[in-house]
Structures are given as structure tokens and as C-alpha cells.
Image (cartoon, rainbow, N blue to C red):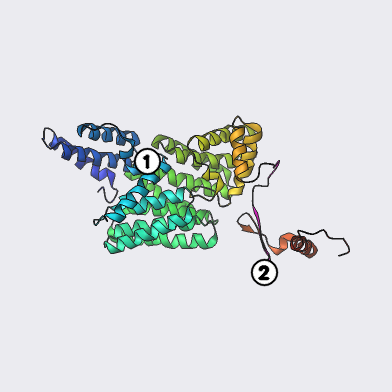
Amino acid sequence: YLDTVNPSQAEQLLHEALLLSEGMKDRESRARLLDLLAENMLNQGRVDKAREFQTQARELRQEGPNVAELPVRLLLRTGRLDEARQLLEERLQAEQQEPVRRPRAHRETLLILSLIMSFQGEREAADCYARASIQRGEALQSQFITAVGHMRLGHAYVLRKDAAGYEEAVRCFQETVQISETLLVPRLKVEAYWGLCQAYGFRGDLTRARETAVLGLNIAQSAGDEWVTACICVTLGAAYAHAAQYDEAIAWLAQADTAFRESGDNYGQTATRLWQSLVWYKMGDDARLQRDVTDLLRRLQTYEYAYLVQRKTLFGPPDPRVIVPLLLVGRDKTSQSAYAMQLLNALGLEDLQIHPGYQLRVQLLGSFQTWRGHVEITAQEWKRKKARQLFLLLLSFRHAMLEREQ
């Protein structure tokens, strides 16, 4: 039940085993049961109880507190991504010297590393670790590891934040769903539905995004996993915000904020605050905008999550430049002015007074194409052919002065 992430079934058995172990001389076996209870509580999103059992296990082994011994998945689910990443990278080096021959289900080093890389916007690394996980699953003949590997590869494709990436991501997530049905492990589908929600939602298919979100939420909530519930809620809320359906976005993001707060995940709360700030900006709600941008910047600095506004991340918008107007608000209208200026400097935008909230991309080699953020500008939008030609002319001779007669 632990390997298939079925915490409600595992909990009763673990408590019965713990009762049976009372009075036993084998302290290590009892400590191991407490470790398993801690992991099971983590699978339910009950972080405080997980820490409590972890502490009991440590005390039973007569060991002092040691941050490095906290389960990596606990670090992941509480937003301590840099710590988790460092521990996993060290573990990966050790495993390359002494390979682990037995499958460890969702606890595989490569699998967790891939997810962390997606959260931090390291697409190539996320892709690499996911593919290595799939290969390991096939080598160990573990369909479970292979299925999770496909999910993590799907997240890496989502990081492309374009139509081709979303299409590949859908294929990966659907592969996981199929394997899950073969294994009869419904819990395995939850993360796949979370991924499908973003792959559908960010390309504009909100109906399917909501359908897959509801499927994932039903399984996650029946298992009592508050953290995954929060991940699905923020993803659906972001999809609605991206589509300018702000009432729906506000409702789902509020649910995500509550669930992440109860799970103790600072990363999730920060990502949620980012989307809430974007909604207030688009709606022109200055009071709530200044309040949430202040909190957003404080969180970005305190927990070192600057990458959330600097590059494409799993929870972030398709075009990170949409965040620049928030940084200008932070610089000009909040108590976090210095840090907002620091972020603008890092982007090379320190002298800006206004920003449209998108990056303009132009392709001049071959066919002429322009994109406003992730959306291609159609020929009809130019209205006059001469306007398009003038734009091309000025770009082609952008380093030279031109006379009107030319």
C-alpha cells in the first residue's frame, strides 16, 4: 500500500503493527515502523504528523535531530527544493558508485529529482532524469517506476509551454493512465490528471482541463492527500487565469492557497500568490494587487524562489514576461521595492517605467512570423500591408538611419 501510495489502506495496518511491536527488544524494527507511518502521513499531506513520527523514530534510535535525515519527499512537499535537490544529487552520485538493485517505487532518486527540476524550471535536466527513470523501470521490470517516469517526462514537456510540448505531454500522461489501469493502482493516475489539466488548460481546452482536474481531485481527496489536491487546484486556477476567466481563477486559487498552507508548502503558496497577483493586475484591483505583490516578493526573497519570475516553471505562466508589470508595481508601490529592483536588474529591465506584460519575438529568417508572448500575431492583425512592410524594413536596417525617400 505504501509503494502504490494508498495511505488510507496502509494506515490501519501500520498502527496495528506498531501496537504489536510494543515491548519488543528490536528497537530498530519499531523505529522502522515509525518511519513508515511518517511516510504514510506524508502521502496524506499531513506534514506535521509525518514530522512527529519521524522525531519518535529518531529518538528511539537515540539519535539527535539532523536536518539531512528528513525524508527528501518531506523537503519537496514543504517547498525546501534546494535542500532536497542537494541531497538527491549527493545520493545519485553514491548510487552511481554502488547501484541500488531493488525498485523503490515513487521514492526513486531520479523520479524525485526530475520533479524538482520541473518545479525549478530546469527543463533539460527534468527531461534527462525522467528518461533515465523510464530506462531504470524497464531494466528492473517495474511498471510502476516506468509509469511515474512517463509522468515526469510529461512535466518536462509542459515546461516548453508551447503547442508541441503540450501535445507530447498529453501522450506521456495518457501512457501513465494506461499503465495504472493495467496495474490496478488508481492512485497512480492523480499526478497524470494534474499534468493533463495543465496540458489541456494552457492550450485553451478548459473543458477537458476541468474534467481531468476533477478526476484527479476525486482520487486525491479520497486518499486524503492535501498536497496533490493543492497542486491540481493551482494548475486549474492558473489555466482559468491564463484564459481571462477570472471568477473561476479566483475560486480555484483560493482553494489552492488554503490547501498549500495546511500542507506547509511554501513553494506552492508562493506560486499561488503569483497567479493571484496576476489576476488582480488584469482586473485592475490595485488594493489586493499591492497586498499580494508585497507578499509574493517577500516569499521570493525569503525562500530563494527567484526562478519563479525568471524562467518557465511547472507552476508558472507560459511567458514569464507577463510577471514584469508585477515587479514594476513592487518597485514603485510596495515595501519590497529594493528586491523588486534587484529582480528587474537581473532581467536587464531596471530602467523600465511601463511594460506590456509580454515578450515580442520576431522571426526574420525564412517566413516572417511574430509572437506576442506565446501567441502568434496573424496577418490580419496588421490591418495594413504597408505597416507590416515598414516594420520589416526598420528591423532589417535597425542599425542604420533611413531617409524617408528610401
The residue identified by callout 2 is 367
The residue nearer to you, when weighing 370 against 133, is 133
Crowding around mark 1 (Cα neighbors within 10 Å: few <14, some 14 to 19, many 20+) is some
* Along the viewing direction, whichever of 9 and 264 lies nearer the viewer: 264
Residue 93 lies, in percent from the top left, at 33, 52
In the image, residue 98 sits, relative to residue 283, either above or below, namely below
**Kind of element beneath mark 1:** helix
* Residue 69: percent from left, percent from top: 30, 39
* Residue drawn at x 66%, y 34% as measured from the top left: 332
For the point 39% across and 41% down, the residue is 83
Q: Contact, CB < 8 Å: mark 1 with mark 2?
A: no
Q: Is residue 214 magenta?
A: no
Q: Is residue 391 above or below residue 63?
A: below
- In this view, 163 is above or below 218: below
Amino acid on which the number 2 mark rests in the picture: Ser
Secondary structure mostly seen in the magenta stretch: loop
Let me know if residue 282 appears in the view.
Answer: no
Q: Secondary structure at mark 2?
A: loop
Pinpoint residue 400: horizontal percent, then vertical percent.
79, 59
Between the C-alphas of marks 1 and 2, the distance is 48 Å
Q: Quadrant of the C terminus?
A: bottom right
Give the amino acid type for the residue marked by disc 1 in the picture: Leu
Residue 186 tag number? none
- Report the side of 283 relative to 230 (left or right): right
Q: Residue furthest bottom?
A: 366
Identify which residue is drawn at 36% across, 60% down.
Answer: 132
- In the rendered structure, find residue 75 and report the number of the disc placed on it: 1
Is residue 350 shown in magenta? yes
Q: Closer to the camera, 238 or 308? A: 308
Magenta segment boundaries in residue numbering? 349-370
- Left or right of 274, for residue 52: left
Report if residue 163 is visible in the image.
yes
